[in-house]
Image (spheres, helix red, strand yellow):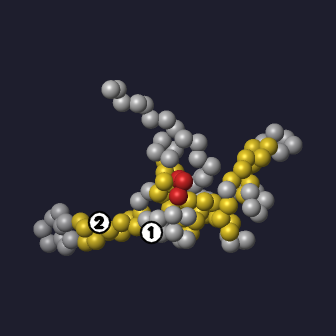
Amino acid sequence: MAASTPTRIKIKIRKGDTVQVITGKDKGKTGEVIRTFPWENRVLVQGVNLRTKHVKPTQEGESGRILTEETSLHASNVMVYSTSKQVASRVELVVDKDGNKKRRLKKTGEFLD
C-alpha cells in the first residue's frame, strides 16, 4: 500500500490570533497563535500545551536543565477568541463591496482583518 501524499488543510486561524482551547487538559485557556502548521492541521499557542524536557549537560562543567516549551494543538481543539466581548466564536469569510475577503466572528460580528 503506497503512502498517501499529505494535503494542506485550509485553516481559518492565523498567526497572531487570540484563541481559546475548547477541549483537553488546557480547556478554557487563551493565548496567541505563534505558528500554524497547515500541512498537519495544527497550531502552536503561546502558554498552552506545555511540555517539559530534561536536557543533559553536553560539556564538562555544564549543568543539566529542564526546558518548558509549547507543543502544537489540533486546529479543531481551538476557537478564535474575542478579547473585547470575552467569548469564543467560529469564523466566517465575508466578501465586502470591493470584492475583498474578510474574516468575521459569527457570534459578535466583529472583523478580524
The image quarter containing residue 1 is: top left
Mark 1 sits on what residue? 25
Image position of 69 with respect to 101: above or below = below
Q: Residue at x 47, y 57 (%)?
A: 73
Q: Residue at x 34, y 26 (%)?
A: 2
**Type of the residue with mark 1:** Lys
**Mark 2 Cα-neighbour bin, 10 Å: few <14, some 14–19, many ≥20:** few
Residue at the left extreme of this rendering: 60
**Type of the residue with mark 2:** Lys
Q: Position of residue 45 (x, y in %)?
A: 50, 62
Name the element at disc 2: strand
Say which of marks 2 and 1 sits in front.
1
Task: Say left or right for 2 vs 49.
Answer: left
Q: CA distance from mark 2 to mark 1?
A: 18 Å
Image position of 108 with respect to 12: above or below = below
Residue at the top extreme of this rendering: 2
Residue 34 appears in the figure:
no
**Mark 1 Cα-neighbour bin, 10 Å: few <14, some 14–19, many ≥20:** few
Contact, mark 2 vs mark 1 (Cβ under 8 Å): no
Image position of 73 with respect to 66: above or below = above
Q: How many numbered badges does the structure rendering display?
A: 2
Task: Say left or right for 3 vs 101.
Answer: left
Q: Position of residue 68 (x, y in %)?
A: 36, 69
Mark 2 sits on what residue? 53
For residue 4, the mark is: none
Q: Position of residue 103 (x, y in %)?
A: 72, 51
Residue 101 appears in the figure:
yes
Q: Residue at x 59, y 42 (%)?
A: 10
Name the element at disc 1: loop
Q: Residue at x 51, y 44 (%)?
A: 38
Among numbered discs 2 and 1, the one appearing first in the sequence: 1
